[in-house]
Image: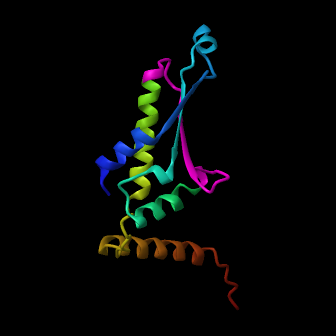
């Protein structure tokens, strides 16, 4: 993955739109378009191999919007701040982080073995449970 090329293609290919943000904020919310939406068509994304692009499509499948022409778009929004510029920077950072995280190959989990102390603790717990159960038994002795 060529991260420099990925970042460059994100900034070149993302379409931004601004709208009014909801929530608290007084008159600022009603007057200023601070909410930022970034739309990135995946076919405009460069710097990823075919395998990374396939992994990206699989991991972000629920976030992708499918267009009529068969193109796929990834949409990211930011509306936390009162400044349009800061929200734009946050949206770009989220988009970059999403793409970088989803294209990365996850490490393969190798199951470990329990330590001797953990094994001993488990056996002691089993013994206590068994003793508790056997103490509940009621025996009638013949006279």
Residue at x 68% of width, y 87% of height: 141
Percent position (x, y) of residue 132?
A: 55, 72
- In terms of depth relative to the viewer, which is nearer, 88 or 106? 88
Q: Is residue 67 left or right of residue 100?
A: right
Can you say whether 26 is above or below 41 in the image? above
Confirm whether the magenta stretch covers residue 16.
Answer: no
Percent position (x, y) of residue 38?
A: 52, 36
Query: Quarter of the image holding residue 97?
Result: top left
Percent position (x, y) of residue 27?
A: 61, 8
Residue at x 48% of width, y 75% of height: 126
Way the structure is coloured: rainbow
- In terms of depth relative to the viewer, which is nearer, 58 or 110? 58
- In terms of depth relative to the viewer, which is nearer, 94 or 12? 12
Q: Quadrant of the N terminus?
A: bottom left
Residue at x 42% of width, y 24% of height: 86
Percent position (x, y) of residue 113?
A: 34, 76
Q: Is residue 5 in view? A: yes
Pick out the residue farthest to the bottom. Answer: 142
Magenta residues, start to end: 62-85
Q: Is residue 80 left or right of residue 96?
A: right
Q: Is residue 143 in view? A: no
């Amino acid at each position: 993955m060529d991260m420099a090329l990925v970042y460059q293609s994100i900034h070149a290919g993302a379409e931004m739109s601004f709208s009014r943000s909801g929530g608290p904020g007084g008159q600022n919310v009603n007057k200023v378009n601070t909410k930022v939406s970034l739309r990135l068509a995946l076919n405009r994304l460069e710097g990823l191999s075919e395998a990374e692009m396939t992994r990206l499509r699989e991991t972000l499948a629920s976030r992708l919007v499918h267009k009529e022409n068969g193109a796929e778009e990834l949409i990211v929004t930011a509306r936390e701040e009162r400044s349009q510029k800061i929200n734009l920077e946050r949206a770009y950072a989220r988009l970059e982080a999403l793409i970088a995280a989803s294209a990365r190959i996850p490490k393969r989990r190798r199951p470990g073995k329990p330590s001797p102390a953990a094994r001993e603790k488990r056996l002691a717990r089993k013994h206590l449970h068994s003793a508790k159960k056997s103490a509940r038994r009621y025996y009638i002795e013949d006279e």
